Every structure is written in structure tokens, then in C-alpha cells.
Image (tube, helix red, strand yellow):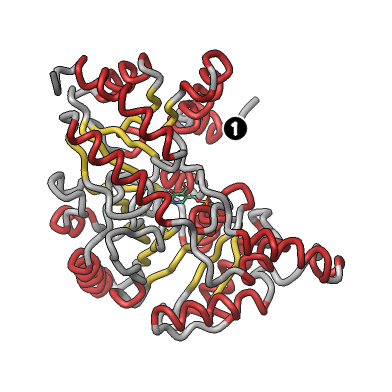
Amino acid sequence: MLSKKIQTALAGSSAIRAMFIEGKELAAKIGEENVFDFSLGNPATPAPEALNDAVKALLDETDPLVLHGYMSNSGYEDVRAAIAKNLNKRFQTDFGAENIVMTVGAAGGLNIVFKAILDPGDEVIVFAPFFGEYKSYAANFDAFIVPVAPNYETFQPDLTAFEAAITSRTKAVIVNTPNNPTGVVYSPETMQGIGEILSKKEKEYNKEIYLISDEPYRELVYDGAKEDFLTKYYHNTIVGYSFSKSLSLPGERIGYIAVPNEVTDAKELLAGIEVANRILGFVNAPSLMQKAVAHCIEETTNLDFYDKNRKVLYEGLTKLGFTCIKPQGAFYLWLKSPVENEEEFVATAKKYNLLLVKGSAFGCSGYVRLAYCVANEKIVRSLDAFEKLAKEYKLCE
Ligand code: PLP
């Protein structure tokens, strides 16, 4: 009864979601406080107070027919103008409202961009490890992802492998920095290199190759690092943003796509993206949330909350003998499995009520991901369980 595509999607259903559901079941059995669930990137610090205030004021003060009504498929003009102005101030760009399309989160944004640019059989290059949903999003349009292995020392993309992976069928490349699942921030040298290779390959194949920057974690950078904005590295860059993590609003489904004027035929591309928003059935991004985020454009999440977790977890785990990539951004920690088969390691961790996600879910086996967007006291208490796990693998005495 199910379509072939959905049968395939069901069969490969998200390991992260499965672990999250398992965590809920375990919590019902042994108590929520005894489960150390590092599976899902669901922020544990609330949306800023200003967001709640904005929602309340909007409900009280705005004409409900406007607030809850249809608008342009790209979103409210004033909201898009506010976002453009904010980006221009921060990143010296020259966006206007016409360059912005409000979306149903990053996921909705990526799907409408894919709908606008992909033909069946097209290839989308992704850098492993990568957000596993990219594969499903490409499959929605009968396109394919082509994973490129990382530099395993740094988890920056391997540029030689990247260049070799580009073919005449390559239509887009996705970068996600700060990265889910590694927590690595791609260096300016990496981005420069990607931009140069793409410019060369566009000429070689005489066609557009889009760089899609998926940036739900843009502002989540630590140790005083400055957030980067990638349009400066390559002319055909499309930015996909989400407020899910930066304002702790993942359930509200709000984000945007920004297409700079220097993108080839930018106007036409924007028109395509807008129509895709409509015909994929999103129609427009949630109206109340569009208005609310526009009021909170200067707000950021509680970075200290995540930074504290990051330090406690990284220091605690390395002290116990685990090999971890030091997270520079986002709220994920990438840990090398002490045994080759990380699924075995994930299963052993579960004995101590530690829920981790296998690296193969991100196209990179031999590693596991920990989402440390959980309460700080949970991280602290989890270290006892990690100690037992480390002892089982003889990583410490
Ligand atoms: N892209 C990456 C890299 C993500 O980590 C996520 C969510 O975790 C998404 C996209 C989807 O974000 P949204 O909830 O805004 O659709």
C-alpha cells in the first residue's frame, strides 16, 4: 500500500529518532533522571524571554486577520527586510527583503531549494560525517548524495577527495558549519579551498554548481570565535538558516533561505524557491513565528549554557581515556568508538543508560555522536556512567 519511496524511507528510518523514542521508553521504566539521553539535538535552554514577550504582544496588539492570515509565499515583507538588514549589519552583505524566503525550518528550506534546482539523477555532494536527512531530502527529488570522506585528524573536509568527487552531474554541494555531528567549525582555508574548486569546476563543466550553506548552528561558536558567513567564499552560495537552535524553537518550524544577488540568475532562482515553498505544500512559514523572530533578531541563545556542558563533557571524557574531537561549535561531541564496530559500543553504552548515536547514521562509522544540549547536572552525573563504560573497555583503571 505504501509508495516505494516511503518504503525505502521507512526501512532506513532515522537512527536518531529511534534512539530518542527508546530514551522516552527507558525513562518511563527507570525514571527520566536515570537516563542519559544524548541522542537528539533538542535544545535544553529555553527560548529567550524576549521571544515570549514578542509572541504575547503580537497576540494582544496585532489584527488577527493579519497575524494569522496568508501572505506572500516568501513570507512577510517587513520580516524579510528585518532579516536582510540584520545580515547586512553583521556580515557586510547587501541583501534586501527580495533576497530572503521565510521557511519551515532548515529542513523546509533545504527541501524547497532542492525542489528548485534538482533534476532526477543529479548529484549533491556532502561532507562526511553529515546530517543524515540530506539523503532523504535529495531522494525526495530523485537526486543522490555523494559523500566525501573527511580528514580524520581534523574532521575538516578533504579537499582532494572533494575535487575528485565532482562530476558533470554535480548540481550542489552542502556545507554545514558549525557541524552536526562533529562540532567542528570549517576553517576559512577550507572554505576558501571549496570556493576555488567550485569556481574551477563550474568553468570546466560550463554549468552552475550551487554551494548550499546549511547553518542552523551559525551563532553557536565557542572560545571567542567569530561567526562566519560563507557567501564571501563563492559566488553561487545559497544560505539556509534556522531559528531552531539559535533561539531554541525547533518545534515552531521557522527559518529562511537567503540568495545573494551575485548568484547566477538570482531573481529566477528566488522565484523558483518561492514557488517550491507553495507547491510542496508549506505555502508559507508559520506566520506568528515569522513576526516573533523579527522582533528578536538581535537575540541569541544562552551560549554559556552549552559552553559549560561542552567543557565538562570534553574534559571528563578525555580524562577517562576516550578519544574526542574537541567541539568548536554547535552542541555535539564526536567520539571515537574504542572498538571498530561502533554499534557494539552504542549497545554497551545503553547498559549504563547512556544513549549515543552511531556514526554510521552520519555516513561515518567508527564514531558516535553525543548531543550535549541537555541539563548541565545531567552531564555531570553522566560521567559516573561513562567511567563504568571506560572501565569496560579498559580505557582507565
Ligand atoms: N541541518 C542540520 C545540520 C541539522 O542539524 C538540523 C537539525 O538538527 C537541520 C538541518 C534541521 O533543522 P530544522 O529543525 O530547522 O528543520
- Using residue 63 as the reference point, say whether residue 259 is left or right of it: left
Residue 106 in sight: yes
Asked if 20 appears above or below 192 in the picture, the reply is above
Viewer-proximal residue among 281 and 202:
281
Q: In the image, what residue occupies the spot 53% across and 82% down?
A: 85
Q: In the image, what residue occupies the spot 56% across and 33% down?
A: 6
Q: Quadrant of the N terminus?
A: top right
Helix or strand or loop: what does disc 1 sit on? loop
Residue 265 in the image, given as x and y percentages of width and height: 46, 80
Q: In the image, what residue occupies the spot 19% across and 17% down?
A: 391
Residue 73 in the image, given as x and y percentages of width and height: 68, 68
Residue 8 in sight: no
- Disc 1 residue lies near ligand 1 with CB under 8 A: no
Tag count? 1
Viewer-proximal residue among 143 and 362:
362
Asked if 132 appears above or below 55 in the picture, the reply is above
Viewer-proximal residue among 253 and 160:
253
Identity, as a three-letter code, of the amino acid under mark 1: Ser
Q: In the image, what residue occupies the spot 42% across and 83% down?
A: 93
Asked if 276 appears above or below 76 in the picture, the reply is above
Q: Quadrant of the C terminus?
A: top left
Residue 157 in the image, given as x and y percentages of width and height: 21, 54
Residue labelled with disc 1: 3
Badge 1 local density, few (<14 within 10 Å), some, or many (20+)?
few
Asked if 329 appears above or below 133 in the picture, the reply is below
Residue 298 in the image, given as x and y percentages of width and height: 53, 72
- Using residue 377 as the reference point, say whether residue 159 is left or right of it: left
